[in-house]
Amino acid sequence: MGSVRTYEVRTYGCQMNVHDSERLSGLLEAAGYARATSDVQADVVVFNTCAVRENADNRLYGNLGHLKPVKDAHPGMLIAVGGCMAQKDRGEVTRRAPWVDVVFGTHNIGSLPALLERARVNAEAQVEILESLETFPSTLPTRRESAYAAWVAISVGCNNTCTFCIVPSLRGREKDRRPGDVLAEIEALVGEGVLEVTLLGQNVNAYGVEFGDRQAFAKLLRACGEVKGLERVRFTSPHPADFTDDVIAAMAETPNVMPSLHMPLQSGSDRVLKAMRRSYRSDRYLGIIDRVRAAMPHAAITTDIIVGFPGETEEDFLATLDVARAARFASAFTFQYSPRPGTPAATMDDQVPADVVKDRYQRLAAVVEQIAWDENKALIGQSFELLVAEGEGRKDGATLRLSGRAPDNRLVHFTPGEVDPRPGDVVVAEITYAAPHHLVSDIAITGVRRTPAGDAWQARQDDGGVVDSSHPHGSGQVSSGPVLLGLPTARP
C-alpha cells in the first residue's frame, strides 16, 4: 500500500447511477484518495449497483467472487457495495460475500468515506441503509468525467407504481430540487467550460409535483435557454403520462434545448400497458410523437421496450411492432422481461416462456434496427454541427476518424481535416454513410470552432489528465414549499 490510498468505482445501470458514481469519486478524492491507474490494483473498490435487471445480481456476485482472491493477496484492501441492489439486498450482500467491507444505500452515498474508515479501523463490515433522503445529493463534491458535458440532477425518486419496476421502493418518492439551485449549478458548470448539460430524474418531466407546479419542467427548460454559454440541453427520462404541450413548446422555442427525446414506450399493447400500470395508452403515446415532430420535424426520438411481460400474447406483441413502425424510432433499447422480487409483476400469472420471450426479442430487435437504419440513411448528404467527443477515435482501414454528437444526439464518426479538434470543440460534418447505430462523414472537416469546453479539456490534459473535484452548487436541500420557478435509471 502506498502513502496515498487509491480507489476504483465500477458502475452499473442508468444515468442516475453514472452521476452518483461521479459523486462517489468526488467524495473519495475529497477524503484524500486518488483514482487508481489501470495498471495498479486499487486499495478501495466501490460497486455502484443496479437492481432493474435479473442478471444484475449475478453480475455483481460474480464480480465480487472474482475479487476475493485479489483482496486476499492485498492486505488492507476494502470493497464497498452501494446503489440500488445494496438498498434492496441490505445484509444479504455481506451474507453472500462476507469479504465485502461496506454496504451503503441510495440515500446515504455521502457516508461512504466514513464507513470505509470505520471498516478499516474496526476490521468488520459496516452496513448502513437509510430509508429516505435527508438532503439532495447535489451538496456532495463531484468528480466529473467530462470537461464539456455534465449531468445535473433535478429530482430523485419516483411516484409511479409500474408493476415491473423496483426503483420507487429503492429510490423513494420523488423529491424535487429547488430550481434556483439547479440553475446555479448549471451556471457554475458553464463557468468551468461545460457546453452541454443533461437534466436527470427518474421521471424528469414530473418535476414540480412536490411544490404543485405542473409547468415547472417547461419553465426550467426555458430558464436554461437564458444561461449564457450553455449550448446544449438534454433531459432523461420523461414519462408519457406527464408529457404536456407546454414541454413541447419549450423544447421547440428554446434554441439550446436539443431536438432529441428519449421517451419509454415499454409496450404497444394497451392491455399490457394497463397490466404494467402505465397511465397512458398507445394512441396517447403516438399523439405525443406527432406533436413533437410537428414542432420539431427533425427531432430524433428514442425509447425503451420490454417484451415478454406476464400475460403478453402474440397479438399484444404484434401491437408493439405496429407502434414501433408508426413511431419510427431513431433507436430503441429493447429488453426481455425480467421478474424482480418485490414487484407485483413477479407474482403475476401467465409468465411467458423464456423461448417465446427470446423469439419476440429477436423479432423486435430486427424491426427497430431496420427502422433506425432507414432513418439514418435519410440523413446522407446533410451536414450537422457536432460536439466532438472524447476518445481515441475509430479506425476504418487506413482512415482514422474522430467522433461527435449531432444536435439530435446521433453518433457521427468524422474525418478530421488539417486541424484536429479537441473534445468539446465544435465541427460541421457532412454525412456520407449510414449504419443502424451511427453515421459516418468521409469528407474531411474544413474548420474547427474552438470552445471554452475544448479549453477546459486541454487544461485537464496539461494537468496530466487529473480532474479536480468541483465544489457543490446550491443549497441542495430537498424542496418542501413553493418556489418561484417550476439514470441504459431505471427509466420509468
Image (cartoon, helix red, strand yellow):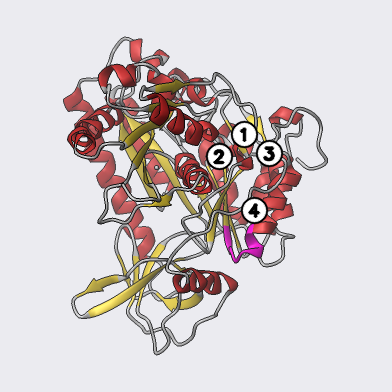
In contact (CB < 8 Å): disc 2 and disc 1: yes
Distance CA(mark 3)–CA(mark 4): 26 Å
Distance CA(mark 1)–CA(mark 3): 25 Å
Crowding at mark 1 (Cα within 10 Å: few <14, some 14-19, many 20+): some
- Magenta-highlighted residues: 189-196
Q: As displayed, is residue 248 above or below residue 462?
A: above
Q: Secondary structure at mark 2?
A: loop
Number of the label disc, if any, that sits on residue 476:
3
Q: Label 3 is placed on what type of residue?
A: Gly
Q: Label 2 is placed on what type of residue?
A: Pro
Is residue 235 rendered to the left or right of residue 313? Answer: right
Q: Label 1 is placed on what type of residue?
A: Asp
Is residue 399 rendered to the left or right of residue 47? Answer: left
Give me the residue at 40% from left, 76% from top.
381
Q: Secondary structure at mark 3?
A: loop
Distance CA(mark 2)–CA(mark 4): 13 Å
What residue did someone put label 4 on?
251
Q: Label 4 is placed on what type of residue?
A: Met
- Considering only order in the chain, which callout, 4 or 3, is on the residue closer to the N terminus? 4
Q: Nearer the viewer, residue 305 or 207?
A: 207
What residue did someone put label 2 on?
238
Number of the label disc, if any, that sits on residue 242:
1
Name which quarter of the figure residue 396 lies in. bottom left
Crowding at mark 3 (Cα within 10 Å: few <14, some 14-19, many 20+): some
- Considering only order in the chain, which callout, 4 or 1, is on the residue closer to the N terminus? 1
